[in-house]
C-alpha cells in the first residue's frame, strides 16, 4: 500500500514539474491600419484609445502589428505598461514608413537577438522585388522565457497587397530564414499575409507550418473573416490574417476578435489570437 501511495505522489510531483516547465502564452496578430490623415473618421487619433483598450483587455503576451507608423507604435508602448517592441520601418530600415513590429511583455520574456529582413531578392536592405507594389518586411526575434529559460522564435510580417508573384516568393524568403535561424526551436509566424486559404502561398505555408485556426481539436471562436474595411454594416468575407506555428507548439485555443465600440471597429482588420503551449 505504501508503495502505491509513494508512486502516486511521485507521479503528481513529476506532472507538476513538467507543467511548470511548459510555456503557455497568448499571441496575437493585429493590422492596426496606418494613420491616414485624409480619413477624418478613422484616423489614429480617433481610434488609438480603442486599440489600446482592446489590447489591455485581451492581454496578449506577444502581439504582432502591421501598418503601424512610428508614432502609433510609440502610443501603444506608452499605453501599455511593461511592453517593448521589435522592428524597423520598411522604407529606410529606421523610422520611415510602416512597420511590421511586434510587442512583448518584458515581465515574461526578453529578446536574445532580433532583426528585420525585406521580402525581396535582397532581404538584407530596404528593397522590393518581383511584382510588389511596396517594400515589405518581416521582423523577428529569438526570445527567452525568463521563468524556464527556454528559447523560441517570433516572426511577424505583412505581405504585398498587389503582387501575386511577390506573395508566392515571400513565403520562400520567410521559410529560408526560419531554417537558417530557428533550428528545432518553437516558431510562431504571424501577420497580414494578403492571401486567402485557397491560394498557392497558403498551401506552401501550411505544408511547412500549421494554421492555428485549423488545428485538430481546436474550436475557433469568432468570425472566420479578418478584414472588415471599417464597414460595420457589412459582413466581412475575407480571411487574410494568420498565426502559424511549427510542430514544436501545441495550440490550445484560437479566436478572431470582432470587438467594436459605438458601432465602429478600432481597425479595418480584426485581430486574431491563439493560446499556444510548448
Image: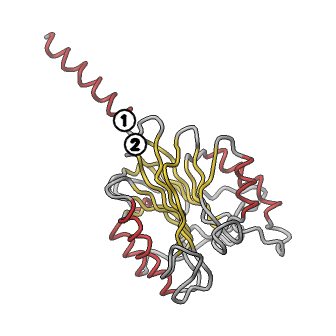
Q: Residues within 10 Å of mark 1 (few under 14, many from 20)?
A: some
Instruction: Please report the residue visible at 40 percent of the width from the left and 76 percent of the height from the top.
Output: 172
Q: Nearer the viewer, residue 193 or 130?
A: 130
On screen, 190 above or below 16? Answer: below
Q: Position of residue 252 (x, y in %)?
A: 41, 48
Which of the labelled discs sits on residue 21, or is there none? Answer: 1
Alpha-carbon span between mark 2 and mark 1 = 9 Å
Point out the tag, 2 or 1, that comes first from the N-terminus: 1
Q: How is the image coloured?
A: secondary structure
In the rendered view, does 123 fall on the left or right side of 187? right
Which of the labelled discs sits on residue 30, or is there none? Answer: none
Res 210 → quadrant: bottom left
Q: Position of residue 57 (x, y in %)?
A: 65, 44
State the quadrant of the N terminus. top left
Q: Nearer the viewer, residue 22 or 57?
A: 22
Instruction: Give SS at disc 1.
Output: helix
Instruction: Please report the residue visible at 13 percent of the width from the left and 14 percent of the height from the top.
Output: 3
| Residue under numbered circle 2 | 150
Instruction: Please report the residue visible at 52 percent of the width from the left and 52 percent of the height from the top.
Output: 27
Q: Is residue 233 visible?
A: no
On screen, 142 above or below 22? Answer: below
In the rendered view, does 90 fall on the left or right side of 167? right
Residues marked 2 and 1 touching at CB (< 8 Å): yes
Instruction: Give SS at disc 2.
Output: loop
Q: Nearer the viewer, residue 31 or 75?
A: 75
Q: Residues within 10 Å of mark 2 (few under 14, many from 20)?
A: some
Q: Position of residue 183 (x, y in %)?
A: 33, 58
On screen, 202 above or below 151? Answer: below
Report the residue that reaches farthest toward the right: 40
Q: Is residue 160 visible?
A: yes
Q: Position of residue 260 (x, y in %)?
A: 71, 57
Instruction: Please report the residue visible at 72 percent of the width from the left and 60 percent of the height from the top.
Output: 266
Amino acid at each position: 500500500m505504501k508503495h502505491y501511495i509513494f508512486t502516486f505522489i511521485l507521479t503528481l510531483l513529476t506532472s507538476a514539474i513538467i507543467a511548470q516547465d511548459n510555456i503557455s502564452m497568448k499571441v496575437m496578430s493585429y493590422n492596426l491600419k496606418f494613420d491616414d490623415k485624409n480619413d477624418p473618421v478613422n484616423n489614429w487619433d480617433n481610434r488609438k484609445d480603442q486599440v489600446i483598450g482592446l489590447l489591455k483587455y485581451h492581454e496578449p503576451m506577444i502581439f504582432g502589428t502591421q501598418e503601424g507608423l512610428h508614432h502609433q507604435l510609440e502610443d501603444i508602448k506608452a499605453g501599455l505598461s511593461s511592453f517593448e517592441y521589435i522592428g524597423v520601418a520598411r522604407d529606410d530600415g529606421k523610422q520611415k514608413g510602416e512597420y511590421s513590429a511586434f510587442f512583448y511583455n518584458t515581465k515574461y520574456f526578453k529578446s536574445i537577438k532580433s532583426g528585420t529582413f525585406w521580402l525581396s531578392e535582397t532581404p538584407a536592405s530596404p528593397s522590393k522585388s518581383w511584382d510588389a507594389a511596396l517594400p515589405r518586411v518581416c521582423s523577428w526575434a529569438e526570445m527567452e522565457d525568463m521563468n524556464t529559460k527556454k528559447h523560441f522564435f517570433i516572426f511577424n510580417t505583412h505581405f504585398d497587397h498587389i503582387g501575386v508573384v511577390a506573395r508566392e516568393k515571400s513565403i520562400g524568403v520567410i521559410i529560408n530564414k526560419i531554417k537558417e535561424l530557428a533550428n528545432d526551436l518553437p516558431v510562431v509566424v504571424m501577420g497580414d499575409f494578403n492571401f486567402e486559404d485557397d491560394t498557392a502561398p497558403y498551401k506552401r505555408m501550411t505544408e511547412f507550418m500549421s494554421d492555428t485556426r485549423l488545428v485538430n481539436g481546436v474550436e475557433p471562436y469568432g468570425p472566420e473573416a479578418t478584414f472588415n474595411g471599417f464597414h460595420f454594416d457589412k459582413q466581412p468575407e475575407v480571411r487574410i490574417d494568420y498565426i502559424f506555428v511549427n510542430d514544436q507548439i501545441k495550440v490550445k485555443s484560437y479566436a478572431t476578435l470582432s470587438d467594436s465600440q459605438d458601432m465602429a471597429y478600432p481597425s479595418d482588420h480584426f485581430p486574431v489570437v491563439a493560446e499556444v503551449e510548448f
